[in-house]
Image (tube, rainbow, N blue to C red):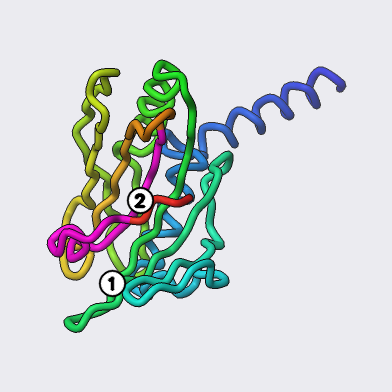
Amino acid sequence: MRKIATSLAFLSFSAGSLAQGAFSNSTSATLEKVIQDYPNRFKDIKGDVIIQNPQTTEYQSKVHVPGSSSCIVTHYSSSKNDVYSWGCTLLKTEDFNTAKNKFREIFNQIKNSIIKLNGNKPYILNGQYESPTEDKKFTTVIFELIPAVGEMKAVKINLSLQYLVTEWKLSLSVYDQAIKDSDQVIASGG
């Protein structure tokens, strides 16, 4: 009887693991929550105001990638329209190899993730990997939602590794294409 109970427990655990799917991880789960709130201009994940400037307001994000140092929602005010971004600092380190390995790990967690939005067919995150090198001070991968339709065409997901003065900073952001088109800086957390 004990062997049967042990076997059933093992099978139950194995089935649960398989049911999670290939794309189940904390980074893609967080991205799905953020992207689901994009049509609402991140109103459901926007927390308290951190900093208010004439053209931008930064808010605490209620959604974080586990292990990240900070995640923020930024509101960009302009005469044409208001746009929002969500940014998260995933890692700060002086060691390039640590940063490079984490960049690859996060890329693998994000690529081909399935994003489900209420009332829509699922989207797949698609991006082309670019390998960071120590002499190149900035590396970025832009992910898009496939199929890109309607207002979701404007959504971009940016994974970047940048050398800033004495350390490497790994960031993840979700933003509206209008931010890039207007050459505004994308918020990527503190």
170, 39: nearer the viewer: 170
Measuring 58% from the left and 39% from the top, which residue is drawn there? 67
Q: Earlier in the sequence, mark 1 or mark 2?
A: 1
Q: Report the magenta residues as a range.
A: 169-186
Residue 22 image position (x, y, % from top left):
42, 33
Residue 170 image position (x, y, % from top left):
40, 36
Can residue 71 be found in the magenta stretch?
A: no
Give SS at disc 2.
strand
165, 186: nearer the viewer: 165
Residue 75 relative to residue 184: left or right: right
Q: Which residue is mark 2?
A: 173
Numbered tag placed on residue 83 in the rendering: 1
Measuring 72% from the left and 28% from the top, which residue is drawn there? 8
Q: CA distance from mark 1 to mark 2?
A: 14 Å
121, 132: nearer the viewer: 132
Amino acid type for the residue under numbered disc 1: Val
Measuring 60% from the left and 28% from the top, which residue is drawn there? 14
Give SS at disc 1.
strand
Measuring 49% from the left and 38% from the top, which residue is drawn there? 25
- Classify 63 as above or below 84: above
The extreme right residue here reads 2
Residue 66 position by quadrant: top right
**Quadrant (top left, top right, bottom left, bottom right) of the N terminus:** top right
Residue 137 position by quadrant: top left
- Classify 110 as above or below 151: above
